[in-house]
Image (cartoon, rainbow, N blue to C red):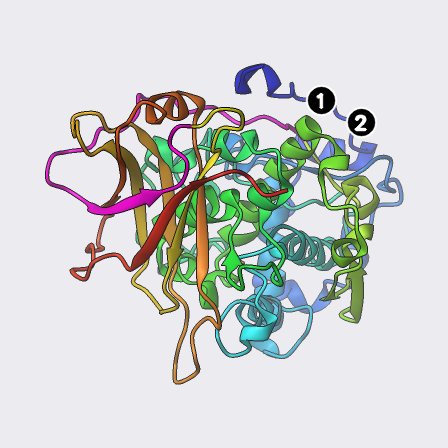
């Protein structure tokens, strides 16, 4: 079965939006809140007697919607209200900044022990975080059917129009890409990630795995990191990304791709043991109170109160990038080249534990005895780690690329193989002079 056969068709929406919301969506009734009126938001203008939940709120694809679409306007209002709360009181737990700061706490080196990237907390923590923001915002706009949008960057390769414009709460002036810039096709490839059978290889390994390293899931180090770094500015750094209004939209898309993986691999493919199921995270609920949620209670999005309007991605459209002569850093690759039974499914890299210049890379495997033979494997991105006097990451990070079937077949006939890693220049950003600090590459099997 090929990847395309396994793309799940978009489901019909479980339920229509309730009448009040539908009316609002159809008629495009004004939902904008003048900044001056924010003080009276507790008033009844948001509460409609007929807008009781009649189905699970639907997260919609914001790239497919016009900036003045009522669903988009409601989201903008929500972001505007939360930002205003933080202007009044930066510590308001239901304000934009206090929420965004949670991400900084869980990702930078201030508390390396709280790290939720580079491992198996990646999908689950971000699900909990977006869910928390969604609940806070739903309460703020007083619309029980409210759901956050997602940015399906595989189809909408520019930053969607609603995120731009003066006096727009969604605008972020730190972005290094403009409204007309298009993300390279291969940065958005999730085919390799979706092909992996191991949840760990897809979404991230336990932090206490025997290697002693942190091992990133394929979706995180490729697609997820690529988009962060491509947008740049706040989004290009874990410490500031939570402040960017694109953050939840990108993460909801990652969350949606996780749901796609679950639909094709089956729920039993996920870890079934308490070490994962009982992991829990602290979050802020719609009342601004602290709440603890365990992974086992987050695995059904309907129970959390959301579904997506679509569970498909657009596969890569363009042919593989080619390796240009004389470019890139080469690394000898260890591992079984002549496989008989199980074929290696992944290419692993170790990276040193240092804060790094953010960098998107393309990876090729080359036959050392026949350098013209260099199939393209995929991408990864290194995002910087805040240091500021504190140690960086407390361990090394291992990154993994899924090997496409076509590459596996070719590599099997290589006499000796090396990986070539090529930094991809992005607008306004230089490729660092220093060699990309990667050690040891090997072809390996997925580890269950
Ligand atoms: Cu916590 Cu997309 O980063």
From the image, tell me which residue sits under label 1.
11
Q: Nearer the viewer, mark 1 or mark 2?
A: 1
In the image, is residue 67 above or below residue 286?
A: above
User: Camera-side residue: 50 or 405?
Assistant: 405
Residue 113 image offset from top left, x and y in percent: 59, 74
Residue at screen point 11% across, 35% down: 325
Q: What is the quadrant of the N terminus in the image?
A: top right
Q: Is residue 316 magenta?
A: yes
From the image, tell me which residue sits under label 2.
14
Q: Is residue 318 magenta?
A: yes
Secondary-structure class at tag 1: loop
How many marks do you count on the picture? 2
User: Camera-side residue: 202 or 405?
Assistant: 405
- Outermost residue to the bottom: 389
Residue 55 image offset from top left, x and y in percent: 84, 35
User: Camera-side residue: 124 or 210?
Assistant: 210
Residue 24 image offset from top left, x and y in percent: 71, 36
Secondary-structure class at tag 2: loop
Q: Quadrant of residue 311?
A: top right
User: How far apart are labels 1 and 2 at the CA level?
Assistant: 8 Å
Residue at screen point 39% across, 58% down: 383
The reply to whether residue 165 is in sight is no
Q: Are marks 1 and 2 in contact (CB under 8 Å)?
A: yes
Q: Quadrant of residue 3?
A: top right
Point out the stretch of residues depicted in magenta: 309-338
Classify 10 Å Cα crowding around label 2: few (below 14), some (14-19), many (20 and above): few
In the image, is residue 21 above or below residue 298?
A: above
User: Camera-side residue: 196 or 413?
Assistant: 413
Most common SS among magenta residues? loop
Image check: 112 left or right of 338? right
Q: Quadrant of residue 116?
A: bottom right
Classify 10 Å Cα crowding around label 1: few (below 14), some (14-19), many (20 and above): few
């Amino acid at each position: 079965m090929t990847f395309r056969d396994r793309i799940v068709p978009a489901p019909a929406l479980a339920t229509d939006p309730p009448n009040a919301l539908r009316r609002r969506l159809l008629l495009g009734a004004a939902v904008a809140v003048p900044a001056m009126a924010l003080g009276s938001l507790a008033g009844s203008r948001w509460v409609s007697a007929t807008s009781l939940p009649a189905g699970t709120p639907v997260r919609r694809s914001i790239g497919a919607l016009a900036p003045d679409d009522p669903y988009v306007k409601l989201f903008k209002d929500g972001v505007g209200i939360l930002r205003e709360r933080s202007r009044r009181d930066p510590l308001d737990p239901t304000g934009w900044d206090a929420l965004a700061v949670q991400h900084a706490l869980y990702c930078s080196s201030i508390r390396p022990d709280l790290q939720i990237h580079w491992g198996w907390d990646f999908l689950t923590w971000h699900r909990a975080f977006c869910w928390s923001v969604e609940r806070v915002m739903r309460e703020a706009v007083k619309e029980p059917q409210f759901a956050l949008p997602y940015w399906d960057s595989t189809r909408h390769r520019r930053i969607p129009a609603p995120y731009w414009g003066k006096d727009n709460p969604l605008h972020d002036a730190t972005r290094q890409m403009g409204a007309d810039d298009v993300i390279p096709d291969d940065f958005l490839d999730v085919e390799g990630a979706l092909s992996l059978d191991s949840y760990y290889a897809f979404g991230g390994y336990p932090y206490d795995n025997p290697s002693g390293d942190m091992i990133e899931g394929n979706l995180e180090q490729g697609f997820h990191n690529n988009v962060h770094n491509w947008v740049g500015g706040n989004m290009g750094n874990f410490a500031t990304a939570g402040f960017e209004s694109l953050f939840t939209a990108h993460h909801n898309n990652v969350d949606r791709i996780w749901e796609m993986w679950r639909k094709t691999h089956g729920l039993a493919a996920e870890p079934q043991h308490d070490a994962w199921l009982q992991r829990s995270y602290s979050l802020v609920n719609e009342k601004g109170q602290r709440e603890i949620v365990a992974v086992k209670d987050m695995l059904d999005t309907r129970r959390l109160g959301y579904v997506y309007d679509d569970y498909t991605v657009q596969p890569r459209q363009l042919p593989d990038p080619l390796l240009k002569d004389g470019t890139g850093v080469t690394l000898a690759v260890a591992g079984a080249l002549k496989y008989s039974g199980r074929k290696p499914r992944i290419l692993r890299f170790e990276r040193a534990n240092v804060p790094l210049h953010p960098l998107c890379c393309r990876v090729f495997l080359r036959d050392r005895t026949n350098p013209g033979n260099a199939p393209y494997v995929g991408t990864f991105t290194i995002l910087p780690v805040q240091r500021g006097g504190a140690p960086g990451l407390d361990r090394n990070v291992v990154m993994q690329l899924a090997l496409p079937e076509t590459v596996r077949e070719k590599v099997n006939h290589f006499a000796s193989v090396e990986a070539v890693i090529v930094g991809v220049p992005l607008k306004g950003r230089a490729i660092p002079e220093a060699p990309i600090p990667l050690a040891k590459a090997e072809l390996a099997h997925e580890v269950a």
